[in-house]
Image: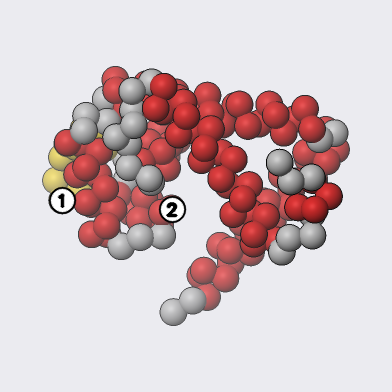
Amino acid sequence: MQPTHDLGSLPMPALLRAARGAYAHAMSRRLAAGGFDDLPRNGPSVLGGITMHGGSLTYLVQELAVSKQAASQLIDSLAQRGYLERNPDPTDRRRISLHLTDRGRRAFDAVLAGIAEVDGELAARLSPEDLRGLRKGLAELTAIHRLTAQCDP
């Protein structure tokens, strides 16, 4: 294992990529242990998006930064594997409504357990002030991304 002080000299994008990997590995372990090893790479984001923001294809396209076609293919795959259901939106027949199945909810619970595992390890390594600072910094990076993404053609 590389000492923390060596990692601190890495460029910020490399640190962010590696940090994301901590969550990805923990979620993958939990998903595999729960029998959800067929969940596609962006599957946890879709399950979380549906749970937290409802079943909007438009939201998923924006959140995943993929084309509508790619998001539709991912949704098709998740539906075929029993993670979600697609139904016509009762208020607008042109739209579909996405809902997690029981299997999808159990997979999302495994994702949450992986997140909690890494969050707990992080809380054990950082002071509460450092953890608040990390969250604030990440929130500001997200705000920068959203602002600049609106400016892109």
> Which residue is the site of mark 2?
63
| Viewer-closest of 18 and 89 | 18
Q: Secondary structure at mark 1?
A: strand
Task: Give percent across and percent down for residue 83.
Answer: 27, 31
Q: Is residue 54 visible?
A: no
Asked where in the image residue 32 lies, by quadrant, the reply is top left
Left or right: residue 36 versus residue 2 is left
Counting from the top left corner in percent of width and height, residue 148 is at: 57, 71
Who's the residue at 81% across and 35% down the image?
126
Q: Position of residue 59 (x, y in %)?
A: 38, 51
What is the spatial separation of the Cα atoms under label 1 and label 2, in whole angstroms?
21 Å
Q: Quadrant of the C terminus?
A: bottom left
Comes first in the chain, label 1 or label 2? 2
Three-letter code, disc 1: Arg
Up-down relation of residue 40 to residue 84 (above or below): below
For image coordinates 66% across by 31% down, the residue present is 119
The quarter of the rendered structure image containing the N terminus is top right
Residue 83 visible: yes
Q: Can you identify the residue that label 1 sits on?
A: 94
> Left or right: where does residue 144 sit relative to residue 38?
right
| Front label number (1 vs 2) | 2
Instruction: Give the camera-side residue of 30 and 57.
Output: 30
Q: Which mark is residue 83?
A: none
100 up-or-down from 16: above or below: above
Identity of the residue furthest to the bottom in this view: 153
| Count of numbered tags | 2
The colour scheme is secondary structure
